[in-house]
């Protein structure tokens, strides 16, 4: 389906039909790949999730107190809730677990923010499998899922949080301010980055500069591998391997490097990717590896997953005149 | 359906002419002179050869530029950090222009005795930059009441609405003409190229080419 930008909400009944159709199709496609559907709880005790959530995500969750005085959170970020559920399953069953889900979430947003307060999301997680093969499975799965839902030629911006994380750690050790570095990289602002680096060594400044590039090339990884920290070099090597693996399965044309990828959710530990498409003015979905999240729930275990918002796809389908 | 042109949102007024002149200098367009008449969407001649796709200008009120870029209606925009930092626009800032920089200053009437803001029991500050002023007052320990104005902020102090103003100062000429002087400079602003966060495909490549062309002028703050 070609997808012209479509800004006006379709009629309510049309939106419901389309969302149900897209979600059913997605979950069926994931089921054929071994991802069994689960339900994600609507509510969870905040205390169970507190250590697993980064400050940015914590701030976006609706919180309230139940009659017994327990602080609860409303379903906002699905990955920690799924991880908490799967940790309970893992306590009784070892081996890989593959799950999918589709549900509605609600997040606190500022008035200006692009995302709606409530949105319909679906995703899948692969728990208990480490390394390159699982990462490629999830990335290819994300591209295939979007194709199943009518979005051809999506672009996968691929990064590794260890690159920016390792470079920022090294710069902080040299006297730079962490918050200013994180903001400069998030904004891809090279002038702000230079200011934030202050008197950091020139080699480090050369290594960190590509994190602000909109279209970095493989040569940028060489700067990082030459002068970055151990952690940044690990991230760069892992990123190279994943790009090569995606090229080997014929998906190379859809991959772009993103050296600015940061641990924005607080739980990512390695590969991090975002899906875009020229016909959509917001990201379609995102995912990554989170090897330490289940340990917050007592079951240390590697994991990787992807989630997307269904609503832009519903709008696009309606804009194409599709009604069911 | 053919893809739409790359859209650059620029503020009407002073920044419009400076931006066009700089784009021409960077070789992105063939002419710094555009006569849009009353149109608000203008095609830029000569840009396609450089960027790989046609370029359109959207002529907007300054405060609306980040909105159009954050929503992806404009792919790129030109805007001062004074406007950016007052809002919550989620945009990228891949280039800083060598023009349009100003300083943020606290100013008061020249004929009034200087206010020691850290010792005053209460000071009323008139400003367009409420968020920046609130942060400033909080960080400096000022007991401040902030009055929001949308323009001609100098009058706020000149006519006694406020004790002091917080406003952008370029040469200081407007302050002096209205009987004010700078008490202290409290920040600096720059003019940034904004980019939509969800750029993909040909648009992302075109914006990367635009940034490269601007960088190639070697006039940015990092090239000093």
Image (tube, coloured by chain):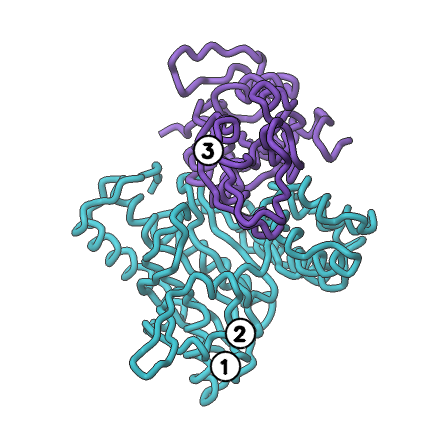
Chain colours: A cyan, B purple
Q: Position of residue B97 (x, y in %)?
A: 64, 29
| Residue B161 image label | 3
Residue for point 63% across, 30% down: B102
Residue B62 can be seen in this image: yes
Label 1 sits on residue: A297
Label 3 neighbour load within 10 Å: few <14, some 14-19, many 20+: some
Real-space CA distance between mark 2 and mark 1, rounded to the nearest whole angstrom: 8 Å
Say yes or no: labels 2 and 1 on the same chain: yes
Under tag 2, what secondary structure?
loop
Real-space CA distance between mark 3 and mark 1, rounded to the nearest whole angstrom: 58 Å
Q: Nearer the viewer, residue A255 or B90?
A: B90
Under tag 3, what secondary structure?
loop
A317 lies above or below A47: above
Circle nearer the viewer, 3 or 1: 3
Q: Label 1 near label 3: C-beta < 8 Å?
A: no
Q: Nearer the viewer, residue A119 or B158?
A: B158
Under tag 1, what secondary structure?
helix
Real-space CA distance between mark 2 and mark 3, rounded to the nearest whole angstrom: 55 Å
Label 2 sits on residue: A293
Q: Nearer the viewer, residue A297 or A181?
A: A181
Q: Chain of mark 1?
A: A
Q: Position of residue A249 (x, y in %)?
A: 54, 55
Which of the image's four quarters has the N terminus of chain B? Answer: top left
Residue B9 can be seen in this image: no
Which of the image's four quarters has the C terminus of chain B? Answer: top right
A164 lies above or below A188: below
Residue for point 31% across, 39% down: A6
Q: Label 1 near label 2: C-beta < 8 Å?
A: yes
């Amino acid at each position: 389906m070609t997808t012209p930008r479509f800004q006006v909400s379709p009629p309510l009944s049309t939106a419901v039909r389309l969302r149900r159709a897209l979600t059913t199709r997605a979950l069926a496609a994931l089921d054929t790949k071994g991802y069994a559907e689960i339900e994600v709880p609507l509510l969870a005790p905040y205390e169970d999730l507190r250590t697993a959530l980064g400050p940015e995500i914590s701030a976006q969750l609706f919180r309230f107190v139940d009659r017994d005085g327990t602080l609860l959170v409303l379903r906002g970020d699905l990955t920690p809730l799924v991880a908490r559920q799967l940790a309970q399953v893992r306590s009784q069953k070892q081996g890989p677990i593959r799950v999918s889900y589709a549900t509605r979430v609600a997040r606190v947003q500022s008035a200006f923010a692009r995302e709606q307060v409530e949105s319909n999301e679906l995703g899948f997680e692969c728990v208990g499998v480490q390394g390159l093969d699982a990462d490629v499975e999830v990335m290819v799965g994300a591209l295939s899922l979007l194709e199943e839902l009518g979005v051809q030629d999506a672009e996968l911006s691929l990064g590794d949080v260890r690159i920016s994380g390792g470079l920022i750690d090294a710069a902080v050790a040299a006297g730079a301010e962490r918050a200013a570095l994180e903001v400069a990289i998030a904004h891809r602002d090279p002038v702000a980055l230079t200011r934030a680096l202050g008197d950091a060594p020139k080699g480090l400044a050369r290594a960190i500069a590509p994190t602000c590039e909109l279209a970095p090339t493989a040569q940028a990884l060489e700067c990082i591998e030459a002068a970055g920290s151990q952690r940044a070099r690990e991230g760069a090597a892992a990123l190279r391997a994943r790009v090569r693996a995606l090229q080997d399965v014929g998906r190379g044309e859809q991959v772009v490097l993103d050296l600015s990828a940061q641990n924005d959710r607080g739980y990512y530990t390695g590969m991090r990717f975002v899906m875009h498409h020229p016909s959509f003015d917001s990201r379609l979905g995102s995912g990554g590896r989170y090897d330490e999240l289940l340990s917050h729930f007592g079951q240390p275990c590697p994991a990787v997953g992807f989630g997307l918002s269904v609503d832009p796809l519903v709008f696009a389908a309606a804009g194409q005149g599709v009604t069911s | 359906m053919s893809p739409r042109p790359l859209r650059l949102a620029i503020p009407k007024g002073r920044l419009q002419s400076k931006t066009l002149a700089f784009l021409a200098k960077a070789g992105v367009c063939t002419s710094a002179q555009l006569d849009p008449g009353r149109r608000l969407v203008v095609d830029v001649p000569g840009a396609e050869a450089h960027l790989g796709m046609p370029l359109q200008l959207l002529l907007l009120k300054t405060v609306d530029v980040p909105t159009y870029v954050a929503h992806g209606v404009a792919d790129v925009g030109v805007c001062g950090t004074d406007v950016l930092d007052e809002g919550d626009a989620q945009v990228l800032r891949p280039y800083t222009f060598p023009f349009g920089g100003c300083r943020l200053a606290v100013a008061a009437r020249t004929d009034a005795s200087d206010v020691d803001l850290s010792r005053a029991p209460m000071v009323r500050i008139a400003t367009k930059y409420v968020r920046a002023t609130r942060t400033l007052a909080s960080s400096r320990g000022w007991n401040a009441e902030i009055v929001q104005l949308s323009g001609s902020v100098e009058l706020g102090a000149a006519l006694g609405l406020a004790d002091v103003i917080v406003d952008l100062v370029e040469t200081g000429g407007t302050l002096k003409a209205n009987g004010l002087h700078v008490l202290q400079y409290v920040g600096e602003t720059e003019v940034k190229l904004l980019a939509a966060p969800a750029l993909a495909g040909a648009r992302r490549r075109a914006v990367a080419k635009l940034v490269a062309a601007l960088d190639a002028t070697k006039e940015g703050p990092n090239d000093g």
